[in-house]
Image (spheres, grey):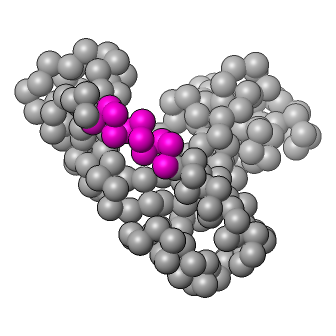
Amino acid sequence: DPKGLQLSVGTKVIVETVRGLEIGTVVIANRMEDEEKCFLPLSPVIRAATEDDIKKEKENEEREKEALKICEEKVRKRNPEMTLIDAEYTFDNSKVIFSFVADGRVDFRELLKDLASVFKMRIELRQIGVRDETKSIGALGMCGRKVCCAQFLSEFSPVSVRMAKDQALSTNPQKISGACGKLICCLNYEEAAYEDAYK
């Protein structure tokens, strides 16, 4: 929600989110949108980012690299079955969030204590799935383009082998699996058209 501000593409802005204040970049200029198509409630734009805000964002990016190294060392000692993916400071520096992937549940209580003693702030360890990992890291799809999840998908929809059958595609897992190892999300895109055609 631009809150009355006229914002052009590429402008850095400070936005109120569920995690607190965050800095973001405008990717679509102001426009009216049908409420039914939006994820409500909309995050309000507080203001355009200042030079100090942009400097702080760059400083946080550098701190995140260092935090990732420290956490990787601690993970090797405590929970070698975890694979660390990302470290992120909230814009106000009230919390650092570490994302990781692992098979099954992980007991990270000791790791959390280690990290809290180093960073002296709130720590969040967030387990993500392989699809989220690919979204975070990015990859190329079999089409040769950047994977949809890293480019524009905001949420993952269920995908099934039946969709491949409906579209007369090979059901060989190697041919219909994406970089994440799961079925390719784009099987969803034309499924409705095939269902209508079969009716």
Residue 146 shows up from this direction: yes
> Residue shown at 67%/71% (left/top)?
74
**In the image, which residues are magenta?**
53-63
Q: Is residue 30 left or right of residue 131?
A: left
Relative to 20, does residue 82 appear above or below in the rendering? below
The answer to which of 58 and 180 lies nearer the viewer is 58
Relative to 30, does residue 137 appear above or below in the rendering? below
| Helix, strand or loop: magenta stretch | helix
Q: Is residue 197 magenta?
A: no
Relative to 188, does residue 107 appear above or below in the rendering? below
Image quadrant containing the N terminus: top left
Q: Position of residue 98 (x, y in %)?
A: 54, 60
Relative to 90, does residue 61 appear above or below in the rendering? above
> Residue shown at 39%/69% (left/top)?
121
> Residue shown at 65%/35% (left/top)?
138
The answer to which of 139 and 119 lies nearer the viewer is 119
Residue 101 shows up from this direction: no
